[in-house]
Amino acid sequence: MMFRSHQAGWRLLLLAAFIPGVNLQRNDSSELPSEAKIFRPVLQPSESVPPIGTYMLNSLKGSPCIKVTMGVEYIITEQKTWYFNLDSSRVRVSGYCGNQAAVLSITMPDNAASLQFTFTKEKKVFFVTKLTAHLSPMPVCKKCANKTYSGLVAHDKMFKTANGKSFKCKSENQLLMSSLLQVKLVPLQIQAFTLDKGQYGKEVECWADYNKRIIPIVIGAVVVGLLLIAALTYLFLRDSRSHGYESL
């Protein structure tokens, strides 16, 4: 068999030498592939509204155990402020669900950006005990060095809500992850451990939304009260003057 293959090789060489137009192509599988492109976020000099995405994680039994709807904006402050919005269509969702603890990880290709929620269930409530963030963007200039920004918020009962209900906040939740990195979640709706058919439970309003809704009502009531007091005072004084003694 080896002798026949050598004969075939010599015949091809002779054809290439004596017959014009016959070319030999090298089929070498050892050639190196082209350099793989690594995805890296591009920082923007101005702020824009982040797209809203819904991220859901199922338990090992296949039932939904975590659901988060939010827009995510990374804010880098280093000499100048830069912004990057998370694209929900390009992320991978992973994590795990336990009886008392759960984790939701949202990761972009090549781990260029990530956000991870750690949930804890305590009696009849749940909350986020740790939030970690990571961003590896493109350098902002040609001579700028590659940098990675990471940070976390821990040891806090964030977004605390009764089990079976969802925490909802239309106002900004801007979290300081490190001295250089902030993460803004706007809007935000979140629920863990108990999700009936994958649907959010009764909404629990955040304090920022409550204040925005109540303060105008309180101010309006105070203004109306002051106007009413002024009107009653005017009527009282006018009535007192009309019943005064007439001069002789």
Image (cartoon, grey):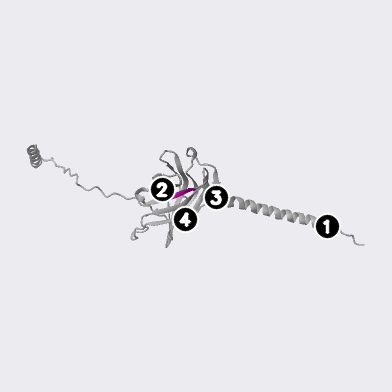
**Magenta stretch secondary structure, dominant:** strand
Residue beneath label 3, please? 206
Please identify, in this view, whether the residue under mark 4 or under mark 2 is nearer the observer: 4
Q: Quadrant of the N terminus?
A: top left
Residue beneath the point at 79% across and 55% down: 235
User: Which percent across, then down, holds residue 96?
Assistant: 41, 45
Which residue is tagged 2?
105
**Which amino acid type corresponds to the residue marked 1 in the rendered image?**
Ser
Instruction: Name which quarter of the figure residue 54 lies in.
Output: top left
Q: Residue at x 42, y 46 (%)?
A: 88
What is the CA distance from the residue labelled 1 to the residue labelled 2?
A: 74 Å
Q: Which one is nearer the viewer's eye here, 189 or 26?
A: 189
Please report the bounds of the magenta region as a residue range: 117-121
Q: Is residue 154 visible?
A: yes
Q: Position of residue 129 (x, y in %)?
A: 47, 52
| Residue 70 position (above or below residue 179) | above
Numbered circle sitting on residue 187: none
Please state if 11 lies on the left or on the right of 226 as rendered: left
Q: Amino acid at mark 3?
A: Cys
Q: Earlier in the sequence, mark 1 or mark 2?
A: 2
Residue at (44%, 52%) from the top-left corner? 131
Chain-order first, disc 4 or disc 2: 2
User: Which of the two discs, 3 and 4, labels the residue nearer the N terminus?
Assistant: 4
Amino acid at the residue labelled 2: Ser
- Say what secondary structure mark 2 lies in: strand
Mark pair 3, 1: CA separation:
51 Å
> Circle 4 sits on which residue?
155
